[in-house]
Image (cartoon, helix red, strand yellow):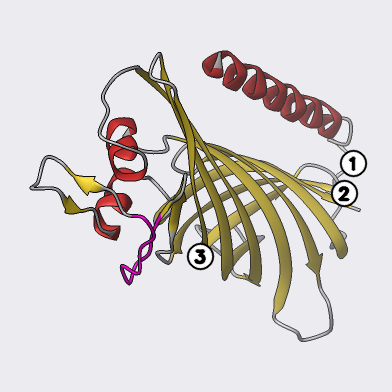
Amino acid sequence: MQENLRLMNKRRIYTLIAGIIILSTLGIGQTTQKKTTGLHASIMTGYSVGYSIQTNLILKDIADEFPFDFRIGIGCTLLNPGIALDARRIFINNATNGVPEKAGFAFDYRLDFLLQKSIFGVNNSYLQFGPRYSSFKGNFKFIGGNEDFDVVSKQWGLGTGFENHFRVSERIEIVFSAGLDFYFPNTLKGHDTSYSPDNDNINPRDDNQNGDVEFVYKDADKAINQPKFVPRAMIGLSFAL
């Protein structure tokens, strides 16, 4: 059922993107050399440790001689949340019954400073860098094993990258973007258990495969795919508002 839900969500996203692209073609042939200024919006899709979609608002040419544009954005990535059997042992118990199912996603919130530079011979290009914030959630179910639990984390991070813009009309541009985000380790919480980077843990479980010693943050972080180094490669459209 989760797989069907993910497929339905992807179809809706693809339909939305296709509609935007069709609308953008109505403006092709109206290209001018006029510089677009003010508020812009964009929608992007691509890879970011999983299928990802992102929306942005960009404030361009804020003041004369000011080198940066600003962008705020929010994205959602569907991803592999981790190793189901290890997650159960570390956050719940040592039972092994049931058929595991898993699903994960991360919302990311970003602020970028954009510096216009010629990249790969494209004059309308930007270097980008700024802070990031991620909200991760992984769900693990064991069908027939009576277990259904989430593991969550909240993280700050930093990111950088570049993007190329290609104008298709006076108000619309195609955007290609690539970059890398890094998120700092933070507490992983699941059920009534949590593991922190300083190992100030709450209700840690015992590892019955290693002399019943308590699990530590390193074990939880290895089992759960919370964001760490996150590469991004995306394509989308930008609209002058």
Q: Earlier in the sequence, mark 2 or mark 3?
A: 3
Q: Which residues are magenta?
A: 194-203
Question: Does dot 2 land on a helix, a strand or a loop?
Answer: loop
**In the image, what residue type sits under mark 3?**
Gly
Q: Is residue 44 above or below residue 227?
A: above
Provide the residue designation for mark 3: 159
Question: Could you tell me which residue is drawn at 35 percent across and 69 percent down?
Answer: 200
**Most common SS among magenta residues:** loop
Give the answer, above or below, for where 150 lies relative to 123.
above
Residue 61 position by quadrant:
bottom right
Does 68 appear above or below 73?
below
Asked whether, in this view, residue 197 is left or right of residue 31, the answer is left
Q: Viewed as shown, does residue 59 lie left or right of 152?
A: right
Q: Amino acid at mark 1?
A: Gln
Q: Tell me the number on the disc at residue 170.
A: 2
Q: Secondary structure at mark 1?
A: loop
Please name whichever residue, 4 or 16, is drawn nearer the observer in this view of the structure: 4
- Image quadrant containing the N terminus: top right
